[in-house]
Image (spheres, rainbow, N blue to C red):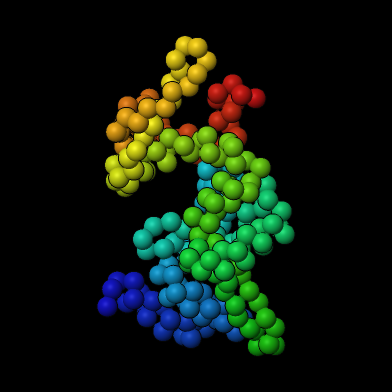
Amino acid sequence: MSDFDTWLTNWRAGIPREKALDPNQRAALEALADFSERHRSIPSSGDVDLWGFGTAQMMARPVEGGWWVCLHDLTEATGIGHRELQTAFLEALDRDEGEADTIEWRNPEDDEHHLDLVRHDFVMRLFAERSPWRREFFENTADLMAHAILKSGLADQLGGVVRITGDGTGNLIATATGETLADVLRSSKLPSEEVARHRACLGPAAALQDGGL
């Protein structure tokens, strides 16, 4: 049994013994324990910095890294309305890739309660595809993403690089160089990972730093 499985077993066993919990709180915690088991995530608290665009309350942390937050916490930071957030959430449920889930429970009066939770990769996709901040998000995180793809080794596997140059008369010439994406990234003016990580969390302030506003 892994450390996580041991923790989950002990936590489940302790919920019924918590005398300070009312029945509704106990039902909610049992639903959260089911969620933890499905996603191998440990309930956590604290604010998550959404790349400088705002914060959200952390609900759980997967054992392999990342975080889960409430869907309704994302409206202000992402600039996306409730209806569109819900649409994106339902689409994620349909994809069934483990980046969205709903915790459901009933209180003693048989009232239904639920909480929609989303994982960090879902939130990144929101910023990249739907947020009015998507251009700023892409520009801020591009260097950090480049470091990530280099670290993963994927950039070394992506070959077939074609460089476009001009011939001086207005015509463009495409030349296959035999390089990989890793070759291109390493030869570019990629800042250090520390600098890239700092910029990725600047949010709208990055434009001010660049003199764009």
Residue 175, horizontal then vertical, whole percent: 37, 27
Quadrant of the image containing the C terminus: top right
Quadrant of the image containing the N terminus: bottom left
What residue is rendered at 55% in x and 25% in y?
209
Residue 149, horizontal then vertical, whole percent: 36, 43
Name above or below for residue 205 compared with residue 108: above
The residue nearer to you, when weighing 123 against 67, is 123
Q: Would residue 191 be seen by someone viewing this image from the given angle?
A: no
What residue is rendered at 32% in x and 40% in y?
159
Q: Would residue 3 be seen by someone viewing this image from the given angle?
A: yes
The answer to whether 211 appears left or right of 147 in the picture is: right
Which residue is at the far top?
168
- The mark total stands at 0
Name above or below for residue 100 compared with residue 201: below
The residue nearer to you, when weighing 189 against 53, is 189
Residue 132, horizontal then vertical, whole percent: 66, 42
For residue 2, what is the image quadrant? bottom left
The answer to whether 66 appears left or right of 178 in the picture is: right
